[in-house]
Image (tube, rainbow, N blue to C red):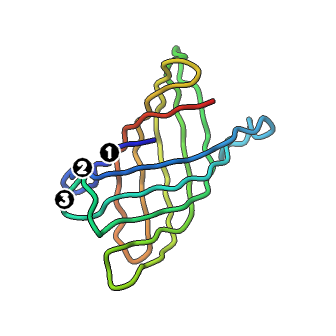
Amino acid sequence: MPASDFDRPGLLPRANLNIGIGHTFGFLKHDPVGDELTLSYTYENAGSHGFFHTEFGAHTETIGVMKNFNLPKTKAVTGYTWIQGGITSLTGYSHVLNRFYDGEALGASIHFNDHNGIWVQETYNKIPTIPWYTTTGIGYTWSW
């Protein structure tokens, strides 16, 4: 899911490259927390050059649970919530800083067909020792 994040404050564009895999489990369909278990890796640039790579970055590995839900009167757009936890490694300092990561997202998927779509998501990010921040992501996704 390649995307650009807009970190606040200031709406600064940042590189955010994510690859993930998830699987929806039928027996979790009625679970209020989620029906899809996910694993993901994300690289996010944190430097002063905006979208381009700098020595300051965050490399995050997470496990999560996603809940997909239908929106009324449409089949082309669905909504989802995504709760993630994992480890983020902050680079660009004298040594790598490893911290716990908590991400909570609300988003929508716009489906072109059964395999291709665009997602739009707002994420609340919390890393201990760093003030919380939100990001808005827009990206492409492929499912099989």
Q: Mark 1 near mark 2, Cβ–Cβ under 8 Å? A: yes
Residue shown at 48% from the left, 19% from the top:
112
Residue corresponding to mark 3 = 49
Relative depth, front residue between 87 and 69: 87
For the residues labelled 3 and 2, the Cα–Cα distance comes to: 9 Å
Instruction: Indicate left or right for 71 with 126 as reference.
Output: right
- Circle nearer the N terminus (3, 1): 1
**In the rendering, which numbered label is found on residue 12?**
none
Q: Residue furthest bottom?
A: 94
Relative depth, front residue between 139 and 32: 139
Residue corresponding to mark 1 = 4
Residue shown at 56% from the left, 56% from the top:
84
- Other residues around mark 1 within 10 Å, as few (<14) / some (14–19) / many (≥20): many
Residue 142, position as x, y percentages in the image: 53, 32
Q: Mark 3 near mark 1, Cβ–Cβ under 8 Å? A: no
The kind of residue on which mark 1 rests is Ser
- Other residues around mark 3 within 10 Å, as few (<14) / some (14–19) / many (≥20): some
Q: Is residue 113 above or below residue 66?
A: above
Residue 57, position as x, y percentages in the image: 34, 65
Residue shown at 52% from the left, 56% from the top:
41
Q: How many marks?
A: 3
The kind of residue on which mark 3 rests is His
Instruction: Indicate left or right for 106 with 53 as reference.
Output: right
For the residues labelled 3 and 1, the Cα–Cα distance comes to: 13 Å
Instruction: Indicate left or right for 47 with 34 as reference.
Output: left
Of badges 3 and 1, the one in the foreground is 3
Residue corresponding to mark 2 = 13
